[in-house]
Amino acid sequence: MRIAIYCRVSTNRQENANQLDQLREFAAKHGWEIVAEYVDTVTGSGKVERPQFKKMLMDASQKRFDLLLFWALDRMSREGIVKTIEYLEQLKGWGVGWRSYTQPFLDTGNDMVTGIVLSVLSAVAAQERITISERTRAGLARAVRAGKVLGRREVAVDVARARRLQHEGKGLRPIAKELKIAVNTLQRALRA
């Protein structure tokens, strides 16, 4: 059987080798031929494009593999029940099966259990995305309460000198270069 592996980690600080190694070993143990590996380092929320996921769907639609193997449902998508089920149904519609390594009951060969469990796990994955977002906002609010200044550092601009250089006929780029600041920073300072 020709299989493809889909692997996703959320940030560059996470390592996808753990997933890939075990998925490869699992495929070898079953005698499956790995014909493609798709690896994304991006959130699975659906808010950011996942180029390898998109390529995997395109290849699936062209029947380049028979089964998609992924680590767990939340590694495939955290977009919620409807969208996740839509992806899996798309695969089935193209004649491509799918299987979760860590959730063996999520397998195209197990329709009844898969439908019920899939709905629950998709909802949990979507809720996890919301929880992560709430934790991030809470952390930022705590940092502000503690006196931490968020965002870019403030840049002091010698506006008088900039205007003097302007009157001498210099353009914004040479003035910004001389003041060692960005052109946009200079423009904002001159408008203020």
Image: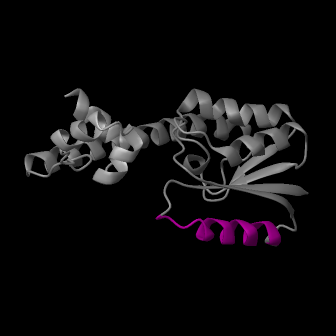
> Would residue 109 be visible to someone looking at this image?
no
Judged left or right of residue 148, residue 51 is: right
Judged left or right of residue 44, residue 148 is: left
In the rendered structure, does residue 117 fall within the stretch colored magenta?
no
Tell me where residue 186 sits by quadrant. top left
Residue 11 drawn at (x, y percent): 48, 57
* Residue visible at 25% across and 46% down in the picture: 151
Residue 125 drawn at (x, y percent): 48, 42
* Residue visible at 28% across and 51% down in the picture: 179
Vertical order, 67 against 113 (above or below): below
Position of the N terminus, as image quadrant, is bottom right
Tell me where residue 112 sits by quadrant. top right
Most prominent secondary structure in the magenta stretch?
Answer: helix
Residue 113 drawn at (x, y percent): 65, 40
* Residue visible at 54% across and 67% down in the picture: 15
* Camera-side residue of 55 and 172: 172
Tell me where residue 44 sits by quadrant. top right
* Residue visible at 55% across and 36% down in the picture: 46
Judged left or right of residue 188, residue 156 is: left
* Camera-side residue of 56 and 48: 48
